[in-house]
Image (tube, rainbow, N blue to C red):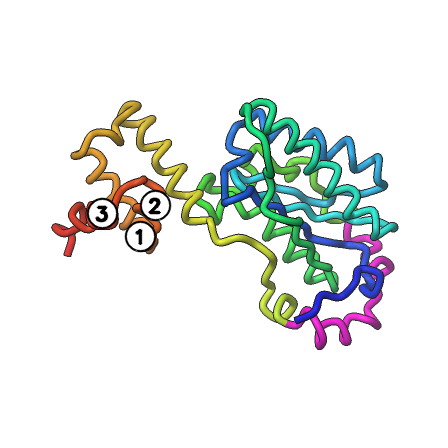
Amino acid sequence: MPRLARNQIKTKFFHNMTQGINKEYIFQDERCKKKYMKYLEKDADKFNIKIIAFTIMDNHTHILVYTDEIDNISLFMKSINEKFAMFYNYINNRVGVVFRGRYKSQPILSEKHLENCIKYIFNNPVRARIVSKPEEYLYSNLKEFKISKILENVKNQIEEKDINSLVKNHEERFVANNEFIDICEDKEIFIKEFIRQYEKKNGLGVCRNRKELEKMVKEIKKETNITNKILASILQLSTSTIRNYLKDER
């Protein structure tokens, strides 16, 4: 389906998402998350962008923005991503691409769509099972967020008369099902966090112990329906090894 040009979309709210190249965890380090947050704040003023909601995960970000100058969104995202890429390459002594292609952007077409998008962004860490409540996550702006101020004049910022044609031609699936652009690594993020917590509880290096590794694999499979192939890739094991660990569970 062809993408509509932003100047044809009568809204000033956009949901943007970026992801690490090859699904790498480019924001895994706390320092990286805080650095990206700093770039967000600094460049938002520079490009006349108001950041409504954001959440920075280990390998991707969600950023909901408002602007009177829609063309500034691409300049804003390009600027923060280029700065972060330089920082990330420097601290990791690497060169090359850091982000997986161009950021994705989704227009927000109604007040309800906006509300759902905000909830979706703040609940990303909950869906990934990193925290049990959105307010527990440190790398979002939930604590500073005030929905009443955002929704006060939203009808003036989203032209309702144009929504029907946009929905029919472009965004029907998003509006009807309350779906939002995302990646499919939630289970991977959960498993990575599960391993970190497991090692914290049972001692560092426990995953190199065959008995403990087997026990952990079984617990992961109980918690998620992830395939053996993907789990093997995350743990850097063969699928036959995973099957052997699980044979007693059948």
Magenta highlight range: 150-172
Q: Which residue is mark 3?
A: 242
Front-lying residue, 159 or 61: 61
Residue 129 lies, with reference to residue 120, above or below; the image says: above
Residue 11 lies, with reference to residue 190, above or below; the image says: below
Picture quadrant of residue 88: top right
Q: Is 222 on the left or on the right of 93, as rendered? A: left
Q: Residue at x 70, y 57 (%)?
A: 114
Q: Looking at numbered disc 3 in the image, what kind of residue is underneath it?
A: Ile
Q: Is residue 34 magenta?
A: no
Where is residue 145? Give x, y as percent.
70, 41
Picture quadrant of residue 53: top right
Marks 3/1: CA–CA distance: 8 Å
Q: Looking at numbered disc 2 in the image, what kind of residue is underneath it?
A: Ser
Q: Which residue is mark 2?
A: 233
Q: Earlier in the sequence, mark 3 or mark 1?
A: 1
Q: Residue at x 60, y 39 (%)?
A: 97
Q: Looking at numbered disc 1 in the image, what kind of residue is underneath it?
A: Lys
Front-lying residue, 11 or 36: 36
Q: Which residue is mark 1?
A: 229
Bin the neighbour count of mark 2 within 10 Å (Cα to Cα): few under 14, some 14-19, many 20 and up.
few
Bin the neighbour count of mark 1 within 10 Å (Cα to Cα): few under 14, some 14-19, many 20 and up.
some
Front-lying residue, 153 or 238: 238
